[in-house]
């Protein structure tokens, strides 16, 4: 008895200790692996394929993005080229204002002409502010007109904590008397702002819409106007590219940024196997630090996650292969996913991923093959994965509407059958 009492007393002491100080980490089932300490004022890591959030901090806070702004400037220019409104070999006459824009720049002379390609490469590789403004004036007829296109695009992309005032990302302090006028209907911000989450959205949509942009962002050095008297070499500020000081396997973009207000920023992307990650660091304390912290995010993502196809297109969801259709000639219709269901899955934890199916209660016969009847979401430990979009469920066969006579006799038969159960 004394031994039992003693063990019970000891167990009580241990339980009290755990309740007071917490259970050891090894005894607590962690839902996700712990992220290393990231030294930045905001950060974000996203799975490129699905848009799923893997980790974040201060991710919705509007912050100065500095030259990461140029991703949106590139987006607008590439949209114009895709629409046939602009060509790579089009000539751009350099204005006195564009040539005077300071800080990172290339050799531009007022009244001289440059090609769209030259200015675009200078913008994304060298982060040339004057080249960006020259492009903006060409496309928007003024930088203000171009900024209006940037803000319109931001809304289309669902960037909720973003506002642009300049095409380059420089602020009023740097522009001085050349600062563009405030856009109509602006919010409380005097200069450009983007949240870390919005920045990741922009990077993802830019690559999805214009994948050729990576050919430029992965370029380490380039010679502009090669073979002419104004030949000029430019170098990429992204020090994570191959053979650069912070090289990281798989990195091929995208954009650095720095101002006194923004600190040191970097939107990175890297691909290994099927998994591509988008990372954002904002407000790092030094040039090197933004790449060191990006490396931590990328290592975390690649070490712990793998992109998996959970269901292929037209495949049924387990336990939800059919949808009841009381008014159909057939009483149920086979259903499957409209497109493949993919998710960034924690390695070794496949069993923790399940499906949540939601059928549209308004769906009834007649149905055509391909009609949308609901949606499916991937869950981890019973919870939605943040920012991963649901996939539509569609009918996999045609189903005609049953006549009132058929339905009458069906109901009658069901009622009689139920008497004998």
Image (spheres, helix red, strand yellow):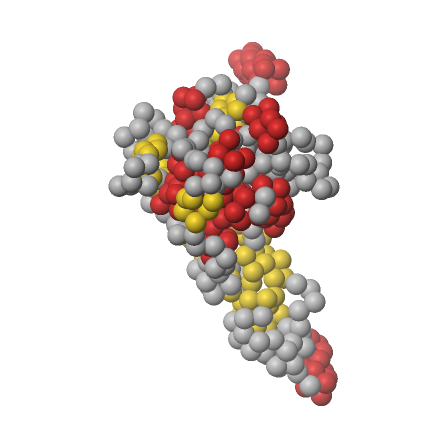
In this rendered view, identify the residue nearer to me: 254 or 346.
254
Any part of residue 301 in sight: no
Residue at the image position 39 percent from the left and 43 percent from the top: 118
Where is the C terminus found, in terms of image quarters?
bottom right
Residue at the image position 52 percent from the left and 47 percent from the top: 138
Q: Position of residue 322 (x, y in %)?
A: 56, 67
Q: Is residue 25 above or below residue 381?
A: above
Residue at the image position 66 percent from the left and 83 percent from the top: 402
Any part of residue 232 in sight: yes
Q: Position of residue 2 (x, y in %)?
A: 56, 11
Q: Position of residue 156 (x, y in %)?
A: 61, 50
Instruction: Give the residue at the far front of this rendering.
Output: 111
Q: Is residue 42 above or below residue 198?
A: above
Where is the N terminus found, in terms of image quarters?
top right
Left or right of residue 289: residue 170: right
Left or right of residue 387: residue 231: left
In this rendered view, identify the residue nearer to me: 38 or 147.
147
Q: Position of residue 68 (x, y in %)?
A: 50, 35
- Residue 185, by quadrant, is top right
């Amino acid at each position: 008895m004394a031994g039992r009492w003693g063990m019970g007393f000891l167990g009580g002491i241990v339980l009290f200790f755990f309740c007071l100080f917490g259970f050891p980490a090894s005894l607590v089932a962690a839902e996700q692996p712990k992220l290393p300490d990231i030294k930045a004022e905001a950060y974000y890591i996203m799975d490129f394929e699905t848009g799923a959030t893997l980790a974040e901090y201060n991710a919705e806070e509007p912050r100065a993005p500095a030259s990461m702004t140029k991703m949106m400037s590139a987006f607008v220019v590439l949209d114009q080229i895709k629409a046939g409104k602009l060509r790579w070999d089009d000539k751009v006459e350099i204005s006195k204002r564009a040539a005077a824009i300071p800080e990172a720049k290339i050799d531009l002379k007022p009244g001289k002409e440059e090609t769209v390609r030259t200015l675009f490469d200078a913008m994304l590789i060298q982060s040339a502010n004057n080249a960006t403004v020259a492009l903006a004036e060409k496309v928007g007829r003024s930088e203000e007109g171009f900024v209006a296109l940037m803000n319109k695009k931001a809304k289309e992309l669902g960037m909720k904590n973003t506002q642009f005032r300049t095409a380059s990302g420089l602020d009023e302090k740097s522009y001085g008397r050349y600062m563009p006028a405030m856009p109509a209907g602006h919010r409380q911000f005097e200069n450009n702002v983007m949240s870390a989450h919005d920045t990741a959205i922009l990077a993802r949509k830019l690559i999805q819409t214009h994948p050729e942009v990576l050919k430029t962002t992965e370029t380490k050095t380039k010679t502009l106007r090669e073979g002419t008297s104004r030949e000029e070499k430019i170098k990429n500020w992204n020090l994570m590219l191959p053979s650069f000081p912070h090289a990281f396997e798989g990195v091929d973009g995208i954009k650095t940024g720095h101002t006194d207000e923004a600190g040191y920023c970097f939107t990175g992307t890297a691909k290994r196997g099927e998994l591509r990650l988008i990372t954002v660091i904002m407000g790092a304390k030094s040039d090197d630090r933004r790449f060191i912290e990006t490396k931590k995010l990328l290592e975390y993502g690649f070490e712990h996650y793998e992109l998996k196809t959970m269901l292929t297109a037209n495949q049924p969801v387990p336990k939800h292969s059919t949808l009841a259709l009381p008014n159909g000639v057939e009483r149920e219709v086979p259903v499957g996913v409209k497109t493949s269901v993919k998710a960034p899955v924690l390695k070794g934890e496949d069993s923790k991923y399940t499906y949540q199916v939601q059928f549209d209660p308004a769906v009834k016969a007649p149905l055509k093959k391909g009609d949308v009847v609901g949606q499916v979401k991937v869950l981890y430990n019973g919870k939605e994965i943040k920012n991963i979009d649901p996939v539509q469920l569609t009918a996999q066969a045609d189903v005609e509407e049953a006549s009132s006579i058929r339905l009458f006799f069906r109901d009658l038969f069901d009622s009689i059958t139920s008497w004998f159960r």
